[in-house]
Image (cartoon, rainbow, N blue to C red):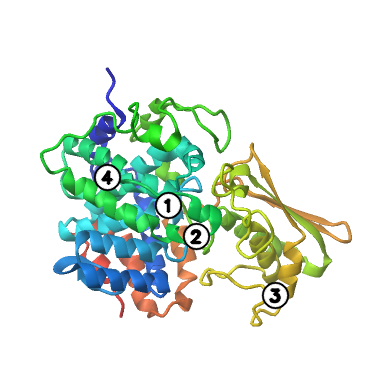
């Protein structure tokens, strides 16, 4: 009889070492870590970030605990992970896998807290991050649209499991305990799509709570208990609950057949790395808007396109990107011209030539914007078309001018899957807008780059504590 999914994952991740990781995987994990740490500085200056720090310090202070980034306070393991997750998630600039899960704000805070408390070295932290990212991405994979169609928000649902793996590895769980930890995580997870569908903001705390729950699942697994072996694929298990069945039948898919297999979830572990498809979000918006902004920025730089001379703009995207959070529960405001829509980001970038990564949302009526009325007018001439045979994060933009000229650009889907060098270049573009000394920000870049040589994570964490 073949091993269960959790048993297969446990057998793979528990003995995993830094030496087992390909150089590209190490580089990718460093890119995700650097992104999350810099974004946490941005998040700490928001009302949500400040509130999360204040609440955690009031409820969970612990003199010998883990560190809240930016603030520097010591709190419980779960408290630090909760606050740091909120900082990384506050401005909607986390990383993204297949559009709808965000491993960074669940996996990284959990790993940082346990690495700090357990005195792990840099190689151990990188290994735990790689394992957790990979397990979370594989469990989510083809199932994400079906989870969304059940009314659940995929990011916390799968993020709980990622946080569990990271914590479990850094606290020394053995194979049986890891199986139990994942079983507990399957029952501790949650988060609905009513907020994304109807405009509620409860999703702002989905990832922080998922991170806490994942940590608890790993810590509780050290007790003398046995989790269900088939917690993922069992008849009443995780997949049945969160995708509607345990047969691999899909309600929706990003493209291709409405059927997948559990064998593919664990196929080629160690050879095929799903985490390589993680995309950082440099702009404070839904992930699917980021490649639209990037592509329009390139088009605008290459062609003279006065907004008043534009007849119309067509944006072709993957169909699920146009029906967020799910075709079963679409948010009507996302599909029509308005602030926050793809129409808006297309128009704003076309008018201004770029979109500012450090501004959450810009009101088209903002008097500080010299071309605000042009943005408002132009987004009414933007048409967004969903296509089932188009890949995720692979938009095509066609600009038709009033004189008949046309300008077109297209992405293949991999353009924003940055390595560490590209991430470093792009994240440095934010430094001048942050209220931190440049040398302190550069020290974070250095700490991440050299993490594999560090005997512990103390200097990395201290580099992220405010000046």
Q: Can residue 105 be seen here? A: no
For mark 2, give the secondary structure: loop
Q: Earlier in the sequence, mark 4 or mark 2?
A: 4
User: Could you tell me which residue is drawn at 63 percent across and 68 percent down?
Assistant: 354
Q: Residue 372 carries which label?
A: 3
Q: Which of marks 1 and 3 is nearer the N terminus?
A: 1
Q: How far apart are marks 1 and 3 (CA)?
A: 32 Å
Which residue is label 1 attached to? 102
Q: Which of marks 4 and 1 is nearer the N terminus?
A: 1
Q: In the image, 175: left or right of 400? A: left
Q: How far apart are marks 3 and 2 (CA)?
A: 27 Å
User: Could you tell me which residue is drawn at 72 percent across and 63 percent down?
Assistant: 379
Quarter of the N terminus within the rendering? top left
Q: Earlier in the sequence, mark 3 or mark 4?
A: 4
In this rendering, the answer to whether 175 lies above or below 114 is above
Q: Residue 165 carries which label?
A: 4
Total label count? 4
Mark 2, Cα crowd under 10 Å, few <14 / some 14-19 / many 20+, is: few
Q: Position of residue 135 (x, y in %)?
A: 34, 40
Mark 1, Cα crowd under 10 Å, few <14 / some 14-19 / many 20+, is: many
Quarter of the C terminus within the rendering? bottom left
Q: Position of residue 414 (x, y in %)?
A: 54, 47
Which residue is label 2 attached to? 200
């Amino acid at each position: 009889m073949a091993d269960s999914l959790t048993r297969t994952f446990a057998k793979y991740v528990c003995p995993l070492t830094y030496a087992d990781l390909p150089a590209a995987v190490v580089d990718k994990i460093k890119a995700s870590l650097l992104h999350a740490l810099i974004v946490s500085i941005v998040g700490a200056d928001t009302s949500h970030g400040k509130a999360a720090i204040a609440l955690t310090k009031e409820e969970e202070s612990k003199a010998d605990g883990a560190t809240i980034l930016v603030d520097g306070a010591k709190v419980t393991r779960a408290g630090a992970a909760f606050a740091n997750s909120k900082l990384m998630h506050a401005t909607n600039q986390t990383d993204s896998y297949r559009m709808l899960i965000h491993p960074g704000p669940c996996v990284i805070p959990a790993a940082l807290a346990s690495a700090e408390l357990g005195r792990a070295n840099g190689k151990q932290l990188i290994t735990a991050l790689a394992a957790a990212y990979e397990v979370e991405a594989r469990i989510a994979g083809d199932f994400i649209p079906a989870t969304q169609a059940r009314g659940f928000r995929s990011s916390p649902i799968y993020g709980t499991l990622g946080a569990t793996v990271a914590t479990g590895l850094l606290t020394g769980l053995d194979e049986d305990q890891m199986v139990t930890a994942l079983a507990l995580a399957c029952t501790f997870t949650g988060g609905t799509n009513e907020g994304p569908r109807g405009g509620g903001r409860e999703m702002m705390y989905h990832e922080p709570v998922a991170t806490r729950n994942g940590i608890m699942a790993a810590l509780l697994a050290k007790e003398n208990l046995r989790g269900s072996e088939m917690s993922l694929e069992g008849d009443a298990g995780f997949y049945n609950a969160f995708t509607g069945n345990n047969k691999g039948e899909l309600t929706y898919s990003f493209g291709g057949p409405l059927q997948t297999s559990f064998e593919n979830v664990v196929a080629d572990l160690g050879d095929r790395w799903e985490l390589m498809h993680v995309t950082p979000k440099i702009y404070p918006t839904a992930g699917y808007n980021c490649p639209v902004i990037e592509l329009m920025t390139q088009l605008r730089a290459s062609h003279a396109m006065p907004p008043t001379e534009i007849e119309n703009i067509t944006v072709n995207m993957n169909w699920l990107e146009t029906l967020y959070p799910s075709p079963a529960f679409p948010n009507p405001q996302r599909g029509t011209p308005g602030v926050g829509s793809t129409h808006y980001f297309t128009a704003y970038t076309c008018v201004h030539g770029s979109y500012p990564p450090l501004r959450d949302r810009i009101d088209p009526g903002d008097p500080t914007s010299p071309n605000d009325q042009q943005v408002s007018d132009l987004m009414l001439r933007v048409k967004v078309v969903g296509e089932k045979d188009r890949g995720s994060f692979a938009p095509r933009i066609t600009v038709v001018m009033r004189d008949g000229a046309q300008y077109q650009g297209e992405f293949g889907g991999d353009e924003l899957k940055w390595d560490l060098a590209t991430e470093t270049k792009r994240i440095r573009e934010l430094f001048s807008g942050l209220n931190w000394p440049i040398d302190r920000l550069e020290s974070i870049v250095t700490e991440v780059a050299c993490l594999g040589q560090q005997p512990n994570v103390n200097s990395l964490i201290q580099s992220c504590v405010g000046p």
